[in-house]
Image: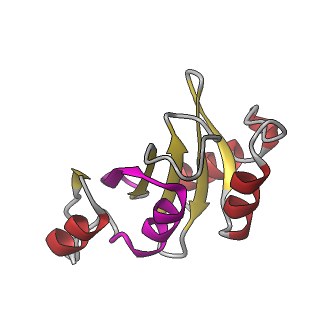
Amino acid sequence: MTDLADDLDQRTGTRSGARTDRVRPAVRQAMAAAGFAPMDLGDGCHAWYRRSEDGTHALISHNNALDGDPAVRDWIVGQYGERGGFVEVGGLPLSRALEGADILPSPVRPDGSLVEALYPSIQQALDDLG
């Protein structure tokens, strides 16, 4: 495991200060069911974190927070590379952000170059990078 991955694993969970006791049950249950754990990103920012087998990880947040109305289109999802790169989509309801965590492509191209891009929709990210 790399140093970055080790650092991310150490920062997840309630030990990091990312409290979930005030998160709406619907959000907390959906995130736990999808394999996400709370993460304190620093500077008052929090996100839900899930690591993939390929070394990338997904983050989902609502305005840099763990909680928000699941139906409101303010959620952001991103896939992040272990050594850099990101593919992010914002303006989603929570259900669509969870779908995006499963289908967004890796931010690392087959040739090893990194993608760093924000997309207005999941479909546009898939069309561009798929």
Q: How far from the left and from the top, in percent, is residue 125?
A: 23, 65
In the figure, residue 124 lies in which quadrant?
Answer: bottom left
101 inside magenta stretch: yes
Which residue lies most toward the front here? 71
Q: How far from the left and from the top, in percent, is residue 81?
A: 39, 58
Residue 126 higher or lower than 49, as above or below:
below
**106 left or right of 59 in image:** left
Which residue lies most toward the right here? 21
The N terminus - image quarter = bottom right
Q: How far from the left and from the top, in percent, is residue 31?
A: 67, 60
What residue is rendered at 61% in x and 46% in y? 7
Q: How many marks?
A: 0
Which residue lies most toward the left here? 128
What residue is rendered at 28% in x and 66% in y? 108
The C terminus - image quarter = bottom left
Q: Range of the magenta residues?
A: 83-105
Q: Which color scheme does this rendered protein use?
A: secondary structure
**48 left or right of 10 in image:** left
Q: Nearer the viewer, residue 121 or 48?
A: 121
Q: Nearer the viewer, residue 111 or 75?
A: 75
Which residue lies most toward the top here? 43
What residue is rendered at 33% in x and 53% in y? 88
Residue 88 showing in the rendered view: yes
What residue is rendered at 60% in x and 61% in y? 50
106 inside magenta stretch: no
Q: How far from the left and from the top, in percent, is residue 75?
A: 47, 47
Residue 55 showing in the rendered view: no
